[in-house]
Image: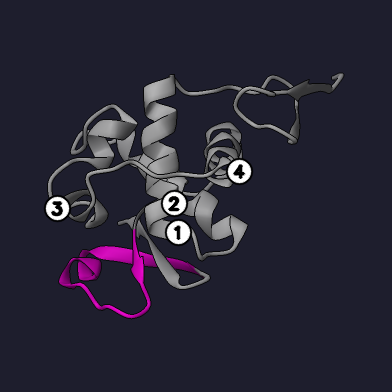
Amino acid sequence: MKKIVLTLSLLLPNTILTAETPKLPKYKELVCMAANAYREARGEPPEGQVAVTRVVLNRMKMKEYPKTACGVIYQKHQFSWTSKYKSVVYTMNDINTVVKAYNSEEEFPATHYHSKAVHPSWRKGLKEGVTIGNHIFYWSK
């Protein structure tokens, strides 16, 4: 299959993505996920930033969560930053993170994560998966 190179100059200045058929979420969803990547994982390695975004995408497929990224992210008590910050902040790196996560075909079933610095009680009902950077990711049992 032939690969194409697509430059998303309006969204990703100075960045070239290589993909067979890159997909983009709707603009509003892209902004929500980019803001979440920034607030939740800006100091993490790239694979950790993608993993945080994949958690949002995985939750969108579950009946317990809203069907949109914005719905998942702004659902009460899911991501603490949403109650602390009113402004939406993100960088071009965060948009790249969303595009990578949105187009990933690699299996990554994590539905939850937390910082290594905390030990939430909800983790006991989940299967511990992988640790990436400062986050521990969990799968549903």
Q: Label 2 belongs to which residue?
A: 38
Type of amino acid at the residue the image marks with label 4:
Glu
Q: Is residue 15 visible?
A: yes
* Lower position in the chain sequence, tag 1 or tag 3: 1
Badge 2 local density, few (<14 within 10 Å), some, or many (20+)? Answer: many
Q: Which residue is pictured at 41% across the width and 39% down the height? A: 33
Q: Label 1 belongs to which residue?
A: 41
Circle 1 SS class: helix
Task: Where is residue 39? Give x, y as percent.
Answer: 37, 54
Q: Is residue 61 visible?
A: no
Q: Which residue is pictured at 33% across the width and 80% down the height? A: 117
Circle 3 SS class: loop
Single out the mark in the foreground, 4 or 2.
2
Q: Going by the image, does 37 lie left or right of 114?
A: right
Q: Quadrant of residue 129?
A: bottom left
Residue 77 image label: 3
Are the residues flagged by discs 1 and 3 in contact, CB closer than 8 Å?
A: no
Badge 1 local density, few (<14 within 10 Å), some, or many (20+)? Answer: many
The one of 61 and 6 positioned closer to us in this rendering: 6
Type of amino acid at the residue the image marks with label 3:
His
Q: Which residues are magenta?
A: 113-131
Query: Looking at the picture, does residue 22 appear above or below residue 132?
Result: above
Q: Which residue is pictured at 30% across the width and 27% down the height? A: 68
* Lower position in the chain sequence, tag 4 or tag 1: 1
Q: Label 4 belongs to which residue?
A: 106
Circle 2 SS class: helix
Badge 4 local density, few (<14 within 10 Å), some, or many (20+)? Answer: few
- Cα gap from disc 1 to disc 2, whole angstroms: 6 Å
